[in-house]
Amino acid sequence: MKKTILDLWYGNTDPQEHREDDPRMRDLLKIMGRNRSELSAALDDKQKETLEKYDDAMNELNCLSEKSIFVYAFRLGMRLAFETLSDENDDD
């Protein structure tokens, strides 16, 4: 347990490295990339700039969302662990 806590503290644990290789995700990323390329090719320079700003905002939103989900899941896991350890003799 201490090693895991220290790994979290020093940033040695990367949740992304343990992501399952989901074929559906891989397929969706390919589709998104292909569609993004086709869309970009059809745009003028001003529209491409707008699309890049949109991409930047989406990336930032995804990062914030992933962080929020991580914090929620971590807290939930800690609550479950705490209840499991503190209610050892309780059969509820």
Image (cartoon, rainbow, N blue to C red):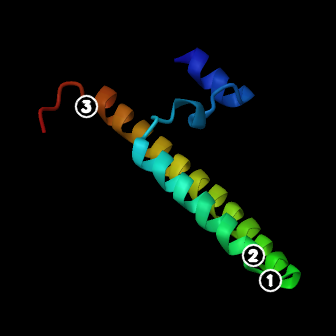
Q: Residue at x 41, y 48 (%)?
A: 24
Q: Can residue 54 be seen in this snapshot?
A: no
Left or right placement of residue 88 versus residue 46 in this view: left
Q: Nearer the viewer, mark 1 or mark 3?
A: 1
- Residue marked by disc 1: 47
Please say if 89 is above or below 75.
Answer: above
SS of the residue at dot 2? Answer: helix
Q: Residue furthest right?
A: 45
Residue 87's disc is 3
SS of the residue at dot 1? Answer: helix
Q: Can residue 20 be seen in this snapshot?
A: yes
| Type of amino acid at the residue the image marks with label 2 | Leu
Residue 46 drawn at (x, y percent): 86, 84
Please say if 12 is above or below 49.
Answer: above
> What is the quadrant of the C terminus in the image?
top left
Q: Residue at x 47, y 50 (%)?
A: 27
Query: Hey, which quadrant is residue 43 in on the image?
Result: bottom right
- In depth, the one of 51 and 44 nearer the eye is 44
Query: Hey, which quadrant is residue 89 in on the image?
Result: top left
Q: Nearer the viewer, mark 2 or mark 3?
A: 2
Callouts 2 and 1 close, C-beta under 8 Å: yes
